[in-house]
Amino acid sequence: MECSRDAAIQCGFDYYDSGAYLTDLSGKVRIMTESQNPDRHAVMLTYYDDNLIPAFREMGFDCQILDNPVNPAYPFLYAERIEDPACLTILGYGHGDVVLGMEDKWRDARSPWVLEQDGDRLYGRGAADNKGQHAINLAALAIVLKMKGALGFNAKYLIECGEEIGSPGLLEICAEKKELLSADLLVASDGPRQQADKPTIYLGSRGHRSFDLVVDLRDRAHHSGNWGGVIADAGTVLAQAIGCIVDKNGAIQVPGWRPAGIPDDVRHVLSGLTFNGGENLGEPLIEDNWGEPGLSTAEKLYAWSSFAVMAFETGTPAHPVGAIPGHAWARCGLRFPPGMDMQDWDGNLRRHLDANGFQNVQVVPQGKGNLDATRTELHNPWVRLACKSIQLTTGKEVVLLPNLAGSLPNGCFTDVLGLPTVWVPHSYPGCSQHAPDEHMLGSVAREALGVMAGLYWDLGDSDT
């Protein structure tokens, strides 16, 4: 077998074309690792023991299960291959858990636990988030190792099984095992490319805060004819309170939730981005008048804050009656870019609601899903190497994003382990992650296998 970078990339393509990748991903999808389902806790170890550990050991990795210091139901898998302690060390990361299967909601009677190919789409829970992505990276590592006989760097890998419930224990395990997890660089894959046909690198993620807004006016509802117009409607109060958090077009009004500005280098890299999504790609059409006025779509997504209402309940939605509700509740989320001081985010909201007359609206922070915003420097030498490598492999200009629009536990790696982070996503915005009909695009997976083989090859040859 020819030992060259081009040959390794071709092996990546061949791995997909032969059906080997689909077989591997099918075995991963079949394991029902729903972290939100208490009945699946034992399945997490099955995913490690039956699927991942054999693959790591075949590559000469030593493997161990790390107990979760916060929640024992969600252990970690750690694998390492140390070729030379003096060499570059790369840490990889992925998560084996998935959201709930939602079995009765998939189209065409598909099962979320059976990988099904339909044209370019590979349907299955975890195909995009995140089993299909770490499957690509592990396959690419194996290709480079088999061809070279050595990676040329030390490889460490951390897999968790609680990412979909907020990564309990990940921060603590990184602090507790800081020496074990020490590395020079994190290379990982999660989330979508900026567009399906555009290889993408992002360097961090927006932060996230989850919270409830609650209005408790009275312990029961009252007839809307007998009492309408003289007692407050909890649903109306809550709707008005939300209306003071954002204006009618979704622009944030809370002081302290709005960035002071956009750094020049971030604005520069975002300036050329275009978006060509739509229903044919499974993506909604972008509404230019929604969000912060005066910003481009890219600036709104990657460099500004956004607020969303995920659920709103008042009265009896399933069986409405003519009564004025005394209680209303909403689950809300705030996403924010790196560089903002969010230590008092809830205090800022409390003061804003009070100033607008909503003292009777409670703010209840949620413990799950809260992540800080992070961003590796755009001009980091590892970023330049990765961009050059991917462009050489694909012949395409790489989209460099300062951070993902979504949120990831990247602070565990940047802030606790002190690593620069390079994320190379293998999904696309219309993949339906966290929803029925989750899928990966075969064309993206095939290209990604070549991309990662080329990147690992270049990292092994690097003297950076």
Image (cartoon, grey):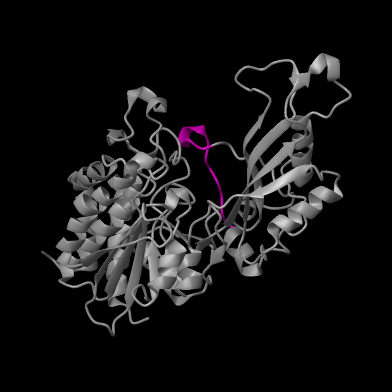
Residue 345 horizontal side relative to residue 126, left or right: right
The answer to whether residue 97 is above or below residue 152 is above
Query: What is the magenta segment's predominant secondary structure?
Result: loop
Q: Quadrant of the N terminus?
A: bottom left
Confirm whether the magenta stretch covers residue 273: yes
Q: Farthest residue in the left direction?
A: 1
Looking at the picture, tell me which residue is in the foreground, 275 or 181. 181
Using the rendered view, name the quadrant where residue 111 is placed: top left
Q: Quadrant of the C terminus?
A: bottom left
* Visible residue check, residue 246: no
Q: Position of residue 110 (x, y in %)?
A: 33, 27
Looking at the picture, tell me which residue is in the foreground, 308 or 74. 74
Residue at (17% x, 46% y) in the render: 18
Q: Position of residue 188 (x, y in %)?
A: 38, 61
Q: Position of residue 250 (x, y in %)?
A: 71, 43
Residue at (27% x, 42% y) in the render: 31
The answer to whether residue 111 is above or below residue 16 is above
Using the rendered view, name the quadrant where residue 222 is placed: top right
Using the rendered view, name the quadrant where residue 384 is placed: bottom left
The answer to whether residue 183 is above or below residue 348 is below
Q: Position of residue 187 (x, y in %)?
A: 38, 65
In magenta, the rendered stretch is: 272-283
Confirm whether the magenta stretch covers residue 8: no
Looking at the picture, tell me which residue is in the foreground, 448 or 94. 94
Q: Farthest residue in the bottom direction?
A: 86
Residue 62 horizontal side relative to residue 41, left or right: left
Looking at the picture, tell me which residue is in the foreground, 53 or 195. 53
